[in-house]
Image (cartoon, grey):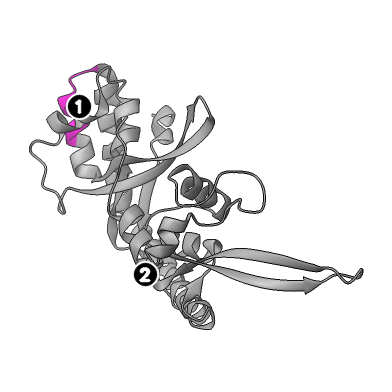
Amino acid sequence: MSEFNLINLNESAGKEPTVSARELYKALQVNWRFSEWWKSASRTLVEGQDFQPVGTPTPLKNRSGIAVKVLQDYQIDVRSAKHIAMMSQTEVGHQIRDYFIDIEERFNDPMYKMSQMVIFAQNQMKLVMDDANFGKRIKSSKDTSSVKTLAEFLTQNGFRIGQNTLFKLLRDEGYLCRRKGESFNLPNHQFVKQGLFEVNTTETIMENGQVRVNRTTKITQKGMDYFLKRYCTNAVAEA
């Protein structure tokens, strides 16, 4: 069943692994829309028990280049994923079901559980240190944060995204200016008025005596809360 290792497992010590509904959908070679398939496949599942809705930032090509969309996805527990695969009543579905059975057997092995608990303890210690450092960065920012810090904040809350991709997402969605020049990557005025952004202005005296003005986009605490709700709880696009 090695060809199905491409169905990535999301593993956390002490918890049953989960799989992406979109990855399962592709592996099952379903030939109808994801939203229609999911409505049928999940009709006997319970949200919060068998699956959790998630939003996944995904680069999509369009006429102007690459845009980042947030696609609706779901993290399904292995038991439910196995049931969905079996209900497809196809050869590939039965093969995927057997793959998930192998995963369940490995997960229930006592030695595997012990190793996962060790990893969990190590990760918890790292999270404590990361949270402490992140809190210090927020506190030292005088209630404003950089786009890099916002990207880290969103990633910690389940929306995995890097600084450059977040800049592009904010430009594509109209929060930041897309026009090349002095205003590039600065917030559009309406969102400054809403209190989501501030512009940090600094002056540097050059060797020739001229003054260079630097403007940096900063996210306010209101903006941090806004984008947490915007990207970590709402999936806004369907494929």
Task: State the SS at label 2.
Answer: helix
Residue 88 visible to the viewer: yes
Residue 153, how many percent across, how many down? 44, 65
Q: Residue furthest left?
A: 44
**207 or 57: nearer the viewer:** 207
Is 66 on the left or on the right of 24, as rendered?
Answer: right
Which quadrant does the C terminus fall into? top left
Residue 30, how many percent across, how many down? 27, 20
The residue at 14%/49% (across/down) is: 47
Is 139 on the left or on the right of 69, as rendered?
Answer: right
Residue 157, numbered label: none
The residue at 20%/27% (across/down) is: 37
Few, some or many residues within 10 Å of mark 2 (<14, 14–19, 20+): some
**49 or 38: nearer the viewer:** 38
User: Is residue 109 placed above or below 39 in the rendered structure?
Assistant: below
**135 or 206: nearer the viewer:** 206
Q: At label 2, which amino acid type do we have? A: Lys
User: Is residue 102 placed above or below 213 in the rendered structure?
Assistant: above
Tally the numbered discs. Answer: 2
Residue 207, how many percent across, how many down? 91, 70
| Range covered by the magenta-colored residues | 83-90
**60 or 210: nearer the viewer:** 210
Few, some or many residues within 10 Å of mark 1 (<14, 14–19, 20+): few
Is 88 on the left or on the right of 230, as rendered?
Answer: left
Q: At label 1, which amino acid type do we have? A: Trp
Task: State the SS at label 1.
Answer: helix
User: Is residue 117 placed above or below 169 in the rendered structure?
Assistant: below
**Discs 1, 2 touching: Cβ within 8 Å:** no
Residue 37, numbered label: 1
Residue 222, numbered label: 2
State the predominant SS element of the stretch in magenta: helix
The residue at 43%/31% (across/down) is: 2
